[in-house]
């Protein structure tokens, strides 16, 4: 499988924010990214996504790199599906990003009943006894199924904040942060300080 990826990897492009030089491509290939053919149901699709995103985190990929590398390892039915989506987006003037790809991917490979259950789980998500780290991870995972609910950064931040335990929530509200990443960092710091 790795040999197939090596033989079919596109040539490096000129440098820029999504630059894929040969050294970077080699690092990606050495980590053994799985190929997704569009078969195997939701479990296979979720497993593929988790494995690919793990590699992206290790390589600290930009959004453009994630999109180019992730869609490159689609084959068969999945590759045909992606080409049709990409063509439709180009005609409509929709920018291709990894997040947009994941939204379309989830719509294609996850049953509506599962998506609805995940959306409800997101709506009802509370920190409760979870650590901040686990709550943040669960929030990020489930938010993919409720993008229409948190379609703006302020809504995402607000939903995250409302789900925190009251002892942490009060301290966070005083900071009046409007974006998710700095808020998540602050919450982690507050939890460390409390322990």
Image (tube, rainbow, N blue to C red):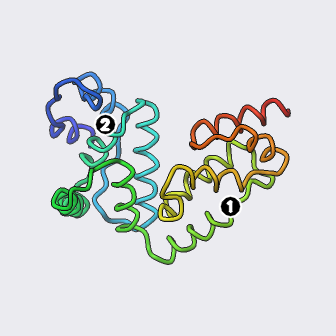
Q: Which numbered disc flags the more N-terminal residue, 1 or 2?
A: 2
Quadrant in which residue 120 is drawn: bottom right
Image side of residue 90 versus residue 192, left or right: left
Badge 2: how crowded within 10 Å, few (<14), some, or many (20+)? Answer: many
Q: Return the residue nearer the eye: 91 or 105.
A: 91
Q: How far apart are marks 1 and 2 (CA)?
A: 31 Å
Q: Return the residue nearer the eye: 33 or 97.
A: 97
| Screen quadrant of the N terminus | top left
Q: Return the residue nearer the eye: 179 or 73.
A: 179
| Residue occupied by mark 1 | 125
* Position of residue 105 measured from the top left corner of the image (x, y, whole percent): 35, 61
| Residue occupied by mark 2 | 65
Residue 62 in view of the camera: yes
Q: Return the residue nearer the eye: 170 or 64.
A: 170
* Position of residue 139 measured from the top left corner of the image (x, y, whole percent): 61, 53
Please tell me which residue is depicted at 64% across the width and 40% down the height of the picture.
Answer: 177
Image side of residue 18 versus residue 56, left or right: left
């Amino acid at each position: 499988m790795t040999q197939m990826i090596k033989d079919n990897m596109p040539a490096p492009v000129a440098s820029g924010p999504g630059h894929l030089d040969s050294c970077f491509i080699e690092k990606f290939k050495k980590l053994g990214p799985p190929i997704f053919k569009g078969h195997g149901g939701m479990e296979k699709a979720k497993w593929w996504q988790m494995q690919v995103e793990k590699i992206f985190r290790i390589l600290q990929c930009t959004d453009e790199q994630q999109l180019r590398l992730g869609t490159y390892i689609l084959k068969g039915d999945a590759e045909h599906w992606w080409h049709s989506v990409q063509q439709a987006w180009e005609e409509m003037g929709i920018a291709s990003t990894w997040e947009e790809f994941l939204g379309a991917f989830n719509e294609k490979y996850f049953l509506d009943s599962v998506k609805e259950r995940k959306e409800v789980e997101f709506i009802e998500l509370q920190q409760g006894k979870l650590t901040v780290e686990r709550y943040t991870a669960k929030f990020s995972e489930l938010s993919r199924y409720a993008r229409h609910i948190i379609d703006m950064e302020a809504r995402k931040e607000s939903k995250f904040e409302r789900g925190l335990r009251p002892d942490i929530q009060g301290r966070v509200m005083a900071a009046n942060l409007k974006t998710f990443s700095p808020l998540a960092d602050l919450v982690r710091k507050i939890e460390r300080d409390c322990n």
